[in-house]
Image: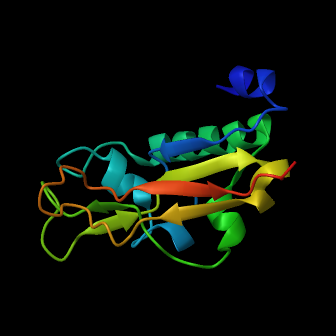
Amino acid sequence: LTSLLSDHKDRLLAVVGDMNVAPSDELDCSTPFWGKFFLAGEDGKGDWEERAVQLRDAHCKLLKDGGLVDAWRYHNPRRKEFTSFQDQGWHKPGKEWHARVDLVLVPERQVADVRPIIYSKITAHAAGRQSDHVPVGLQLALPLG
């Protein structure tokens, strides 16, 4: 992906979707240690800590090497809003876990012109929906002329 980003660095670009990593435990998770819930396996006892660190490190490297910025966090530096709602399966009632793992990543030079959107009014697990995520998208201000 880094090679692809480098090849298209002068073009209009956005990487949008489920990155399977919460950028920050403090702001992007309902409980700390997102990796325990996400990477530990169904019994919750798997070797998750090292994998969580590796995944977050790989995510940070991708942003740095690809010249990308998390557009949501850029425009909402302290706001806490989630896109993934893990409240089914092996998670016990009262132990639900939520995180912002669906991201809008854009080149740093474009981030001021992008408005990321979390469609929180479209609830996860709503009737007829098969997803435990809410959609994300972006609005882009294009120069006229």
Count the numbered circles shown.
Answer: 0
Could you say where residue 117 lies in the image, as x and y percent from the top left?
53, 64
- Where 67 sits versus 25, above or below? above
Q: Quadrant of the N terminus?
A: top right
Residue occupying the point 77% across, 26% down: 8
Could you say where residue 14 lies in the image, as x and y percent from the top left?
64, 42
Residue occupying the point 36% across, 55% down: 36
Can residue 22 be seen here?
Answer: no
Could you say where residue 30 lies in the image, as x and y percent from the top left?
40, 73
Front residue (pair 39, 87):
87
Residue occupying the point 39% across, 46% down: 48
Query: Which of the 4 quarters of the picture holds residue 6?
Result: top right
Q: Residue furthest front?
A: 145
Residue occupying the point 36% across, 42% down: 47
Could you say where residue 81 lies in the image, as x and y percent from the top left?
47, 73
Tell whether 123 sits left or right of 99: left
- Where 63 sits versus 139, above or below? above
Tell whether 41 sits left or right of 116: left
Tell whether 115 sits left or right of 55: right
Front residue (pair 50, 42):
42
**Scheme of colours in the image:** rainbow
Query: Which of the 4 quarters of the picture holds residue 70?
Result: bottom right
- Where 10 sits versus 67, above or below? above
Can residue 34 be seen here?
Answer: yes
